Image (tube, rainbow, N blue to C red):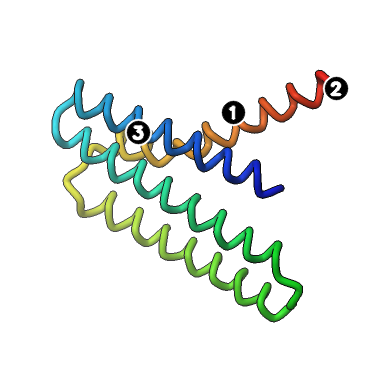
């Protein structure tokens, strides 16, 4: 995936996460807003780190550095899973709101993919 699409996904992810956070803050109680903020924040942070590591991997020619970057991605994902477990298990959040916030990156990936296919179909 090219760097421009990764950046587009990141921007759309940030917009969707902001909309979800503001909407939950305005229309729901504190536990729901807290869950949405935590989930959306993790989604934004997760995709930001994925984009940064992916761009570094595309720029480098060294196989050793690519292996280090892949190892970093695996460690990041393990830490992310552990953090999600701790939040779900111990934090006083609404789990559904947390999942909705965490899922923002999926929606942003779908939007960029659909836009890419629509642009390719026009040409």
Q: Secondary structure at mark 1?
A: helix
In the picture, measured across the screen, residue 40 lies left or right of residue 58, that is left
Could you give the CA–CA distance between mark 3 and mark 2, rounded to whole angstroms? 33 Å
Q: Is residue 1 visible?
A: no
Give the crowd class for mark 1: few <14, some 14-19, many >=20 residues within 10 Å. Answer: some
Could you give the CA–CA distance between mark 2 and mark 1, rounded to whole angstroms? 19 Å
> Tag 2 or tag 3, which sits nearer the N-term?
3
Disc 3 marks which residue? Answer: 18
Q: Secondary structure at mark 2?
A: loop
Could you give the CA–CA distance between mark 3 and mark 1, rounded to whole angstroms? 16 Å
Residue 111 point in image, percent of width and height:
59, 28
Disc 1 marks which residue? Answer: 111
Q: Quadrant of the C terminus?
A: top right
> Tag 1 or tag 2, which sits nearer the N-term?
1
Which of the two residues, 94 or 58, is positioned nearer the viewer here?
Answer: 58
> Tag 1 or tag 3, which sits nearer the N-term?
3
Q: Is residue 87 above or below residue 40?
A: below
Q: Is residue 31 above or below residue 90?
A: above
Marking on residue 123: 2
**Which mark lies nearer to you, 2 or 1?**
2
Q: Secondary structure at mark 3?
A: helix
Give the crowd class for mark 2: few <14, some 14-19, many >=20 residues within 10 Å. Answer: few
Q: Is residue 13 visible?
A: yes
Q: Is residue 21 above or below residue 121?
A: below
């Amino acid at each position: 995936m090219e760097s421009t699409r990764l950046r587009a996904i990141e921007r759309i992810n940030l917009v969707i996460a902001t909309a979800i956070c503001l909407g939950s803050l305005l229309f729901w109680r504190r536990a729901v807003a807290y869950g949405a903020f935590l989930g959306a924040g993790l989604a934004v942070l997760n995709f930001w780190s994925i984009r940064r590591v992916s761009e570094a991997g595309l720029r480098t020619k060294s196989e050793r550095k690519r292996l280090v970057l892949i190892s970093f991605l695996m460690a990041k994902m393990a830490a992310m899973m552990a953090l999600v477990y701790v939040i779900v298990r111990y934090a006083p959040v609404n789990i559904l709101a947390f999942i909705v916030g965490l899922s923002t990156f999926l929606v942003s990936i779908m939007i960029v993919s659909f836009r890419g296919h629509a642009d390719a179909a026009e040409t």
